[in-house]
Amino acid sequence: MAIAVERPVEGAAQAAPPPRRRSRSRAEQRAATAFAVPGVVLLLVFVIGPAVVSLVLAFTNARLVSPTPPEFTGLENFQRAFTEDALFRRSLLNTFVFAAVVVPLQGGLGLVLALLVNQRIAGRNLFRTIYFLPVITSMVVVSLLWRFLYQEDGLINSGLSLLTGGAWAGQAWLAEPSTAMGAIVVMSVWQGVGFHMVIWLAGLQTIPEEVYEAGALDGATPWQRFRHLTLPLLKPTFVFVLITITIAAMSLFVQVNIMTGGGPVGSTSTLVLQIVQKGFQQQQMGYGAALSLVFFCIVLALALLQRRLTRDGD
């Protein structure tokens, strides 16, 4: 006697998850939504909202405190910036020069320090801490400290006078247009190099030791291992470091605001400093918003260009 075996219909009971699993999935979705809502609200209120308002104000003559309502002026603010405001053009040039010097210098020095502290030497954790200490120190404090160091009777001039046997008469580093920006570059690199050293160090830790052992077995010299093994494997880290340093360099503000205020004779004025001065100190909110939009477009273009130039061939 044959026994008939009922086969379950495909896509019927087997496809439907148990009620307990369905309820647990819904509970997880509700919990995820509850956790995401505060972050989304903060993003809308403090990032997206101000960005939209700034975009609108860029095409008006709005002032910070004014009895008259703002009026739409079209591209007048942008025309003023590029054709009439000589200080803006000088600030734009200073910003690009600062970034062009700081990006390779700080990134390269950070890689050198990472390679040094990655060696198996005694006290390497101490060196890592020393190099990273300026990063956790407030930029305001660092700027005030270096402003005293750069004074004509400061520690830097005293040290140079001691090394030269009194031949060095002293230099007002921040008071001379020819040396003010260079002094800020040195301080900025010193303060931020430890942060990028840690990033490079994290990238070095991801490289397997077997790669270097294979290179040594093939007879590669230390320089060849660095050039043909370390650098290619650090490419993702290189892209991240390049973009972060560029954005930070283009956003130069605190050092200049505290150490020189944009002087002397506009030699250290930067784009972000101009935005703050025009928008808040001079209360020209519409013009300051236009400069902010210019700054955003420049940084976005540089980031996209760097990403395109450094991405993989595929």
Image (cartoon, rainbow, N blue to C red):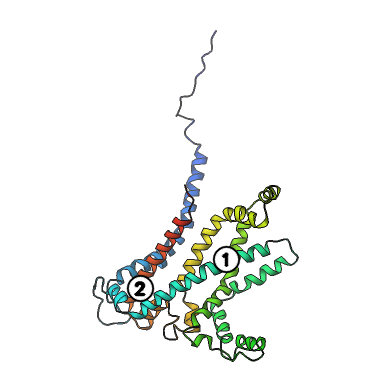
Query: Quadrant of the rendered structure where residue 222 is?
Result: bottom right
Q: Which residue is mark 1?
A: 108
Give the image location of residue 157, x and y in percent: 60, 87
Can see residue 198?
A: yes
Q: Which mark is residue 291?
A: 2
Report the number of discs. 2
Quadrant of the rendered image containing residue 268: bottom left
Residue at the spot 59% in from the left edge and 68% down from the top edge: 109
**Residue 286 visible in the snapshot:** no
Q: Quadrant of the N terminus?
A: top right
**Residue depicted at x 49% and y 79%:** 181
Q: Residues within 10 Å of mark 2 (few under 14, many from 20)?
A: many
Q: Secondary structure at mark 2?
A: helix
Query: What x and y, as percent, mark residue 103?
Result: 51, 68
**Lower position in the chain sequence, tag 1 or tag 2:** 1
Residue 110, image quadrant: bottom right
Which label sits on residue 259? none
Nearest the viewer among 287 and 87 is 87
Secondary structure, mark 1, is helix
* Residue 274 as seen in the image, left or right of residue 215: left
**242 versus 65 height, above or below:** above
Position in image of residue 54 (x %, y %): 34, 70
Residue 124 appears left or right of 80: right
Q: CA distance from mark 1 to mark 2?
A: 31 Å
Residue 239 position, x and y percent, is 51, 58
